[in-house]
Amino acid sequence: MRILRKPPILLLLALLSFSCSLFRSRVKPYPAGAVFPLTETAKVMFEGDINGALVKGEDGRLYFSTDRGHLYCLEGAPPKIAWHVDNPAPFGCPPELAPGRVFVWDIDNVVSCIDRTGQPVWKAKIADRITSPLSHGGERLLLGTEAGDLLALSQATGEVQWRFRTRAPVSAAAVFWKDSIILGSGDGSFYRIGPKGVERGAVDLGSPVSVTPLVDGDYLYIGTEDFGFACYDLRKGTRRWKVMAAGRVLALPRADEKRVYLQASNSVLYALDKSGGEILWWWMAPARRPHGLAFDGENVLVTSRSPILFSLDRKTGKPVGKYEAGTEIRSNPVWVEPNVLFAAFDPEADQGVISQLEREVKVELSSSPASPQPPGAEVTFTAAASGFYQPRFEFTLRQGEERTVVQQASEKKSWVWFPEKEGAYSVHVKVQDEKQSREAEIPFEVAVQKKKDEEKNSEKGDQ
């Protein structure tokens, strides 16, 4: 028979200490990503309207094309134009970035290859109308046509290496899984294609594909025109799950560790569970033309054809901040720590603009009641701070050259003063957190009110 003995006193103390640590509140780490409120700290004007997307390169630069035939490269913070290319015809797609190269096509169906210094490398005329974004894999540059072809071009020369034909126009970009190319077509199927253009298999989806799908690990997330959105296991070649949204997918899906996000034509952003497709949350956007999403820390940045940038909590979908641009946003948001960038269009200037946003860090100091006050009065000085995380406030009183710290740094954002002597003073506050520091100061006069009243009455008598 097992006998339960009393544990030693040291063991009891250890268990008690451990249990207390379980219930001790954890200090949250400094927030990652965009911290609201945001303020515009820089902007770059450009010719025309951006073609869909602002593309961040592995070199830290930003690339975009416009509907007036301009290709731009921005660098630095604040961003500046590193170089730009002027094309005879308007561009029709965002740039595709490959090592050392930038690819883009125009409305004359000419594909241009430019090196990362802005110098032209080659141009290739395509016989059919180009209808898809560009993508690249290995030595190939891939594009879809209105005739239903997927063309593979040599990245080195622009020559067509092979052609894969579907039964309807191709408007979605090709994506990649291992050594296969995955292509969604307007004929209602997605194809698995080998590196030399030979079909390896096809899946009938029952409805056309018009938006580029997402490959995440061994899974394909793909939307169709009949409002369907499905997940396929590419290893097994089987469908894992399918859901019906209240609108068709309009932008490239995105995924994190647990969720896949889709933006639909009913103005709704859905967050679905990756394993089963259940709707975890949904959020209504202010416009029906969404741009691509961006992740920053625990949040997702969202823009649509409206003047507002939103930040949503990835776990709950609840808004945690927003920024009003004052004019319509025309691109995806891009997170370049510690800044958020996007493209907008100014109709009055008939120009595009890249805006750089940064957290607004500021401190304002006020007194109640206001200066002047007589000796012995109770005066409260309060600091209003924004852009800080768990700020601490230090108050200093100054008279002439004499400075005295009257309240050490603490979480208390106000200081109460009972002035004893007349004179001209100033109260200073320093606000800081783990990464930010700002200061503010206001003058304050201590004077006997009786003397002030006598002076006022004397002035009236003189009049």
Image (tube, rainbow, N blue to C red):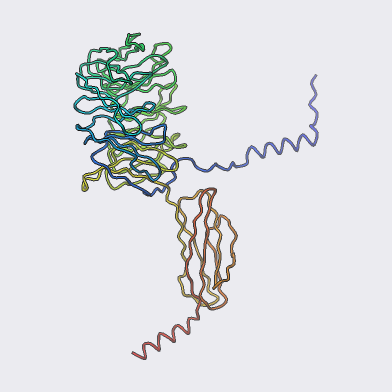
Frontmost residue, 401 versus 110: 110
Quarter of the view holding residue 58: top left
Q: Is residue 52 visible?
A: yes
Q: Is residue 288 visible?
A: no
Where's residue 123, x and y in %?
25, 24
Frontmost residue, 151 versus 375: 151
Work out whether 454 lies above or below 251: below
Quadrant showing the N terminus = top right
Work out whether 411 lies above or below 137: below
Where's residue 94, x and y in %?
29, 31
Q: How many numbered discs, if any?
A: 0
Where's residue 368, x and y in %?
47, 67
Quadrant showing the C terminus = bottom left
Where's residue 425, x and y in %?
52, 72
Quarter of the view holding residue 98: top left
Q: Is residue 164 left or right of residue 11?
A: left
Frontmost residue, 41 versus 380: 41
Residue drawn at 52 percent across, 64 percent down: 428
Q: Is residue 183 left or right of residue 148?
A: right
